[in-house]
């Protein structure tokens, strides 16, 4: 869906969207495509790249806020569709930080010997929960999926440090008010848009820049890596101005920060793994590189991971 498509449905312009967000297009899944379908496509590709068999995966962690069903977890649907007979499968509901929190959990399971090979997928069908009458939010979001396989070895490469934080006091800055047990679904809620994404964008903006920078510094310090040793920062893609402000705060050159928001918009939990994959395929990540991933989103939740590729 292009900005021109949005000009036809809400009071907006391509110029406003590009200058305020950096977004030009986003991918929207059709009605017949579920969140698990997108997750399976990404997971199959990740398994193929890793050379792992389906049987070897003993942990499947799926980050999403748009599962196929309220019950069971989307991870269980993906496990069945993929055929992962030996995997413990569960969802993490960490919004845009879903992939990084999944990576952090997988790393802990592997380091403690409770798992050997984990498949982590960040996936969202945000088009199902976005209000296409609200210009403040609808232009920002897209659908997508990205996945990675993580396995333990003693090469010294891999996840060096992860960091996760949350602050539930700020939960109403980005939320879906109705449809859960506090405000059960009603026709009135649906008519008012309370069953779709509601957001205070400008407040989130400020917290996002500050806390993502703190999260990056935290993992670098924890791993004993200084900024000059970091090859690439792969941030959550919510707004080009957030990413640029983050780069300025970190004092990192923009060419060391991966940006693909113009093509996808904000895909929440899928954003970091999609960016990671594209950066890798473009040759911007090489063996031995130190890569920092960082994300921020509804909860509020933020987190980071420092990886030696
Ligand atoms: N087209 C045209 N005008 C729009 C618009 C759109 N799609 N969306 C909002 N506006 C208007 C607003 O109504 C407001 O008008 P007003 O001044 O007459 O009231 C004006 O633009 C400025 O709004 P403001 O919210 O101050 O803009 P902003 O510069 O903060 O940009 C966001 C808005 C949402 C793009 C920005 O705040 C943002 O990206 N925040 C972070 C969001 C985010 O990351 N959320 C997910 C967390 S992972």
Image (cartoon, grey):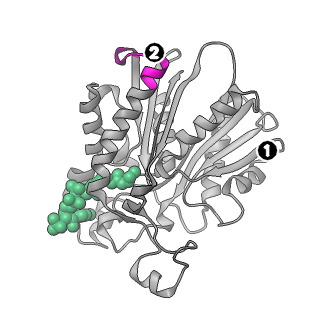
Which contiguous range is marked in magenta? 219-229
Q: Is residue 62 left or right of residue 167?
A: right
Q: Quadrant of the C terminus?
A: top right
Residue 81 in sight here: yes
For this orientation, the residue located farthest to the top is 155
Bin the neighbour count of mark 2 within 10 Å (Cα to Cα): few under 14, some 14-19, many 20 and up. few
Relative to 222, say whether 131 is above or below: below
Regarding mark 2 in the picture, which secondary structure is present there?
loop
> Answer yes or no: do the residues labelled 1 and 2 have beta carbons within 8 Å?
no
On the question of residue 285 being in view, the answer is no
User: What residue do we see at 60% from left, 44% from top?
Assistant: 121
Q: Residue at 46% of width from left, 51% of height from top?
A: 268
Label 1 secondary element: loop
Residue sitting nearer the eye, 269 or 111: 111
- Magenta stretch, main secondary structure, is helix
Q: Nearer the viewer, residue 90 or 51?
A: 90
Dot 1 crowding, Cα within 10 Å, few <14, some 14–19, many 20+: many
Q: Which mark is residue 224?
A: 2
Q: How many marks?
A: 2
Question: Could you tell me which residue is drawn at 43 percent across and 75 percent down?
Answer: 194
- Tell me the residue at 51%/47% (across/down): 270
- Of the two numbered discs 1 and 2 on the same chain, state the one appearing first in sequence: 1
Ligand 1 neighbours mark 2 (CB distance < 8 Å): no
From the top left corner, tell me how far across and down residue 225 is, in percent: 43, 16
Comparing 283 with 196, the one in front is 196
Q: Quadrant of the N terminus?
A: bottom left
On the image, numbered disc 1 is attached to which residue?
A: 84
Q: Which quarter of the picture shows residue 2? A: bottom left
In magenta stretch: residue 221: yes
- Report how far apart the C-alphas of labels 1 and 2 lie in the structure: 37 Å
Residue 253's place in the image compared with 41, above or below, is above
Whole-percent x, y for residue 82 in the image: 75, 48
């Amino acid at each position: 869906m292009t900005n021109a498509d949005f000009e036809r449905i809400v009071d907006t312009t391509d110029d406003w969207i590009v200058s305020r967000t950096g977004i030009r297009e986003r991918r929207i899944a059709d009605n017949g495509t579920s969140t698990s379908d997108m997750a399976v496509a990404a997971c199959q590709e990740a398994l193929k790249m890793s050379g792992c068999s389906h049987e070897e995966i003993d942990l499947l962690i799926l980050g999403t806020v748009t599962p196929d069903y309220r019950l069971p977890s989307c991870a269980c649907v993906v496990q069945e569709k993929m055929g992962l007979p030996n995997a413990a499968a569960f969802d993490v509901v960490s919004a845009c930080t879903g992939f990084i929190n999944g990576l952090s959990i997988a790393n802990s399971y592997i380091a403690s010997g409770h798992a050997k090979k984990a498949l982590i997928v960040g996936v969202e069908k945000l088009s199902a929960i976005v209000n296409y009458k609200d210009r403040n939010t609808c232009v920002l979001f897209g659908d997508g999926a990205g996945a990675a396989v993580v396995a333990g070895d003693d090469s010294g490469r891999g996840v060096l440090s992860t960091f996760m934080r949350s602050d539930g006091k700020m939960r109403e800055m980005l939320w879906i008010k109705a449809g859960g047990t506090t405000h059960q679904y009603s026709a009135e809620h649906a008519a008012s848009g309370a069953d779709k994404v509601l957001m205070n964008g400008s407040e989130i903006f400020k917290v996002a820049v500050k806390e993502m920078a703190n999260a990056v510094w935290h993992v670098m310090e924890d791993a004993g890596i200084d900024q000059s040793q970091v090859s690439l920062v792969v941030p959550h893609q919510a707004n080009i101005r957030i990413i640029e402000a983050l780069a300025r705060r970190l004092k990192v050159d923009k060419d060391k920060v991966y940006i693909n928001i113009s093509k996808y918009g904000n895909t929440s939990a899928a954003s970091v793994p999609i960016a990671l994959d594209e950066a890798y395929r473009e040759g911007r990540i090489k063996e031995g590189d130190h890569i920092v991933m960082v994300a921020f989103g509804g909860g509020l939740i933020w987190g980071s991971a420092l990886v030696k590729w």
